[in-house]
Amino acid sequence: MKIKLNGDESLIPVKITPPENGVPEVVVVTGASAGVGRAVVRRFAQERSRIVLVARGIEGLEGARDDVEKLGGQAIICRGDIADPETSARAAREAEENFGPIDVWVNNATTSVFSLIKEMTPDEFKRVTEVTYLGFVYGTMAALRRMLPRDRGTIVQVGSALAYRSIPLQSAYCASKHAIQGFTESLRSELIHDDSNVRVTMVNLPGVNTPQFSWNKSRLPRHPMPAPPIYQPEIMAEAIHYAAHADRRDMVIGYPALVAIYGNKAFPGVGDWYLGETGYESQMTDQPVDPERPNNLWDPVEGDRGSHGIFDDQAHSFSPQAWANMHPALTLLAGAGLAASAGLLWASVRQKHGS
């Protein structure tokens, strides 16, 4: 089945499935109007979920609501700035007043500035931190106030490989993602101490083809781009939906994210050198960009941008690593089969040479 979804030109294949146990989940998604958040909204809508859409841009929010309804779910709009704690508090109230107890809260809203540190302003650092880090804190607090008394619910933090390995030209964003990772570890330990059934999980993403590269504030001489290889947001949405229902502490999506995180643990100095040499060019196309283009740092950019950015021709629609991560039993079985086959082949070779 294919449905024309708002904000994206292509027909996107979807599989609409009934909710488990016949009871639709209640979900809150921040940054729901575009990019990964928009793809997440669509993925939950395929399960007939009832979703509260949180973002600033009304056109994107209305497009997301239309997507949800086309896919069989229900949605209400909660327009507001996630840097204001009242936005998350209001989203929680509206979720429970309209749909019932919140099952899943997805913290996803971010903003960034592509710039050298020496050219950043204090206000820019503050703004990115308030949205990209404190927005997650406020969302988590709003979710906990509802989930802890019931002793159930899941909070999904949409993280990044940059939470573990920073890159040049995005210092404020990287620092905020590092802060989310540290905050989430503290929360996880407290939930364990309290023997709580509320879960928190973090999904760390690679470079994704989203509209942010066309609307984040930039001082780069050429158009910003995600460091390749680039992946489509639907892969991330599938992983986030999976993480919301699997007993996983965290997840790393995409082979590049895996290399960045674990490579940095082993050889951080190599990462510093490599990114110093390659990290500038890998984040820019060869196309010029208007330094005065509209950006979403302080106010939303007009229009419904959908989930995809401008890099469809470069973006992968499938990640073997992500698939394996979400199918651990099948991956283990396949690995055991390969090991057994290799063992039999080795035994056969030895027997042949020994005879």
Image (cartoon, helix red, strand yellow):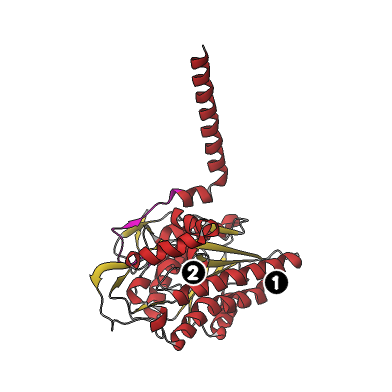
- Amino acid type of the residue that numbered disc 2 sits on in the rendered structure: Gln
222 in relation to 236, above or below: below
Which mark, residue 148?
Answer: 1
Quick one: which residue is furthest to the right in this view? 194
For the question of whether residue 113 can be seen, the reply is: yes
Q: Residue at x 48, y 52 (%)?
A: 322
Q: Give above or below for 130 relative to 21.
A: below
Which numbered disc, 1 or 2, marks the residue closer to the eye?
1
Instruction: Using residue 263 as the reference point, say whether residue 210 is left or right of it.
Output: left
Secondary structure state at the residue bearing disc 1 = helix
Could you tell me what secondary structure mostly forms the magenta stretch? loop
- Name the element at disc 2: strand
Q: Is residue 38 above or below residue 129?
A: above
Residue 123's x, y, as percent? Answer: 45, 88
Instruction: List x then y, in percent, for residue 186.
Output: 66, 70
Viewer-closest of 266 and 35: 266
Q: Relative to 202, is 288 above or below?
A: below
Q: Residues within 10 Å of mark 2 (few under 14, many from 20)?
A: many
Percent of width and height locating residue 74: 49, 69
Instruction: Name the residue that disc number 2 marks.
Output: 74
Relative to 217, 105 lies left or right = right
- Residue 290: which disc? none
- Tell which residue pokes out farthest to the top in this image: 355
Q: Amino acid at mark 1?
A: Leu
Which residues fall within the magenta stretch? 306-320
From the viewer's side, name the closer residue of 337 and 56: 337
Give the CA separation, mark 1 to mark 2.
25 Å
Residue at 47% of width from left, 68% of height from top? 166
Q: Earlier in the sequence, mark 1 or mark 2?
A: 2
Reply yes or no: does residue 195 show up in magenta. Answer: no
Q: Nearest the camera: 199 or 295? A: 295
